Image (cartoon, rainbow, N blue to C red):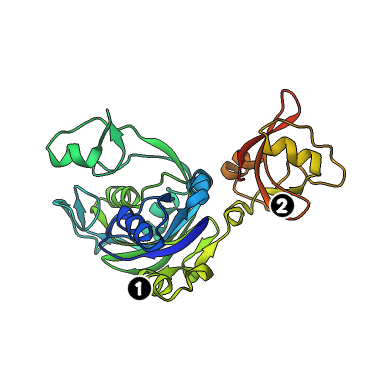
Amino acid sequence: MDGLLNINKPYGVTSFDVVSLVKRLSGERRVGHAGTLDPAATGVLPVCLGRGTRVIEFLVDTTKAYRAEIELGVATDTYDASGRVTQQGDPAGISRAQLDSALASFCGLIQQMPPLYSALKHQGKPLYELARAGITVERRSRPVSIYQLELIDWQLPLVTIEVVCSKGTYLRSLAHDLGQLLGCGAHLKNLIRLRCGLFDIKDSVSVPQLEDAFHHGYWQQFVYSIDSVLIDLTAIVVSNDEEKYIRNGRSLVLEDSGRKVGSNSLKLPVAVETSLENLCRAYALDGSFLGVLRFNPENGQWHPQKVFL
């Protein structure tokens, strides 16, 4: 069983819980998810099965879109509604202009401090485990990109935004930092992941739907092919001889004879475009997907990075 599922993760369960459920329903041992969602968050959770687990890295690197509801006036130690209150303030005097200005400051490439209660590890242990044990460790800010940030609703103390961002962006940190900038404190009240790469929440399958599909044998209609997540890579068709090279893991020279090798068909954000520009997906003459090739500018050859036999 090879492919990917676009699952709408429900509230209150972990991403690992969803993976365990898919393992049980499918009987497939190799199952993994592409991008952790907090238990309190809902929305798109791509789950990869079989050989599909080999494209997780490409999904993790894609842009994500979220709808976040932020409550102004209360800050917590976890940066969300589950935490202990650490600050309270009155947001009543905040104007729309102030809010717009504050939100605009988060657009583009920014430095963001991850939450203390997060799955990031320090000396092999998740930060949330250390935090629960009362151990405080020094965290380092890291660069993340906010490609789009739109104010959807504004009814104080609640603010709803939609964000398109890079991997590694914490919406909890964004909510907390917004509250600090406005001076009243804030935390993330609700979070929905609307999109992860090509997977959109409008096309996602709920857990009850998935359970019913496996029970009645129509689960195949929810499985995406492995190469579908690589749609942003240029596709090329190789000859029989070139196919043999790829299957054997050997580098090869691809002459540009009408094949758009090495250029993306879609215009992507710069950070994403740069990471994909030296990759392409290769197909055999019969249309079967062979794998992902990476260009080596030093020798002018394409090397099979991932081959799907």
Question: Residue at coordinates 39% horizontally, 75% vertically from top-left?
Answer: 212
4 or 126: nearer the viewer: 4
Amino acid type, label 2: Ser
How many numbered discs, if any? 2
Residue 307 horizontal side relative to residue 262, left or right: left
x and y, in percent, of residue 167 in the image: 45, 46
264 or 66: nearer the viewer: 264
Residue 259 versus residue 69 in the image, above or below? above
* Quadrant of the image containing the C terminus: top right
144 or 259: nearer the viewer: 259
Question: Residue at coordinates 15% horizontally, 33% vertically from top-left?
Answer: 135
| Contact check, label 1 and label 2, Cβ < 8 Å | no
289 or 279: nearer the viewer: 289
Could you tell me which secondary element the residue under label 2 belongs to?
Answer: loop
x and y, in percent, of residue 39 in the image: 27, 57
**Whether residue 270 can be seen here:** yes
Mark 1–mark 2 Cα distance, whole angstroms, equals: 37 Å
x and y, in percent, of residue 24 in the image: 34, 60
Which one is in front in this view, the residue at disc 1 or the one at disc 2?
1
Q: Which of the two labelled residues, at mark 1 and mark 2, occupies the earlier sequence position?
A: 1
x and y, in percent, of residue 27 in the image: 39, 58
Q: Which mark is residue 208?
A: 1
Look at mark 2 in the image and give the residue it sits on: 265
Q: Residue 294 carries which label?
A: none
Amino acid type, label 1: Pro
